[in-house]
Amino acid sequence: MRHSSLLAAFAGVVLSISLSVHAETWNMPTPYPDTNFHTININDFAKEIAAKTNNQLDIKVHSAGSLFKHPEISKAVRSGQVPIGEFFMSLANNEMPVFGLDALPFLATNYDEAKKLWDAQKPVAEALLDQQGMMLLYSVAWPPQGLYTKKEIKTVDDLKGLKFRSYNATLEKFASAVGAAPTQVEAPDIAQAFSTGRVEAMITSPSTGVDSKAWDFLDYYTDIQAWIPKNIVVVNKSAFRKLDKATQEAILAAAASAEQRGWELSKAENTKQVQVLKDNGIKVISPSPELMSSLKAVGATMLEDWKKTTGTDGEKILKAYQ
Ligand code: PCA
């Protein structure tokens, strides 16, 4: 071997040793299944970070609550048990009501409104996360939330007494207000909760309806487009600070593209997944005006109650939004 190629081989060995010494793996818990567009988007986010850092940062996605159950994910990031995670933003409503605004019925019901609401929420949400040692990376909206039932729902009275699957405190309140009986069930457990009779109706997106094969246990999807909630991806601040500048920048750039890509995916998702529901025999119907006006009246009361819990932060956001 000539001197120069020996040297090159040696340099190669040194390089690969130093790469393997510095390469880092970040475990990332997420709540939703691999088929869900949020998870698909996160996997692309992880790939982009790997590519941008020459595999120096490997984000290992643990979907469907497999590493931490959904209600534990924000605490796990906050305490540094994991450096990064995804959760449903309005799940944090109990401790921080500001995070629950996007799940209030009929406040923001299309993507333009949802985006405007996010622009208004974001600075306050960032400050609250910062106080908890976390940093916001990005947020992506779910498609509009619709009503899944076994029987056709013509008026709000048809909801009375139904065992209702809920996913946060706000939806629980809404379900109780219309006379249904809510139970908290995480997305990966929906199919089992229906098949064992624990629940018999739900409000969620066409995406989660498809993920859980709603046609196996439900017959109607009433397209009430009641709200557009969001997921957020957050990072532990001190874990982020420990990274070198180039890696930090790679994460921020990948987060910006994930946010953009995610909102576009979400819009396309609504049309696509409503069609999948139809193809599998779910009757997709438009709500009656009576049903809508009763549901909206409940939403208006809930907004008033929400304002009371958030004080000036809430006022600031609503003013910016409206
Ligand atoms: N799917 C999630 C949250 C909102 C949505 O559309 C769920 O049902 O748990």
Image (cartoon, grey):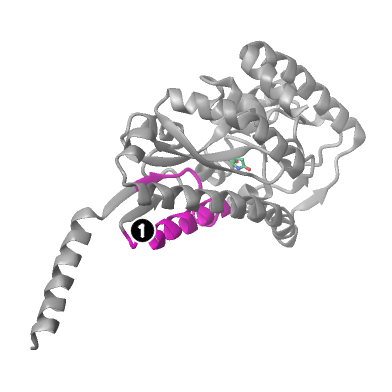
* Residue 46 part of the magenta segment: yes
Closer-to-camera residue (97/66): 97
Give the quadrant of residue 76.
Answer: top left
Point out residue 75 in the picture as x, y percentages from the top left corner.
39, 29
With respect to residue 301, does 194 lie above or below? Answer: below
Region in magenta: 27-55
Task: Identify the residue under disc 1.
Answer: 53
- Magenta segment: does it hold 158? no
* Extreme residue in the bottom direction: 1
Percent x, y of residue 33: 50, 51
Q: Quadrant of the C terminus?
A: top right
Q: Amino acid at mark 1?
A: Thr
Q: Residue furthest front?
A: 4
Q: Residue at x 34, y 55 (%)?
A: 58
Above or below 241: residue 257: below
Quarter-of-image position of residue 52: bottom left
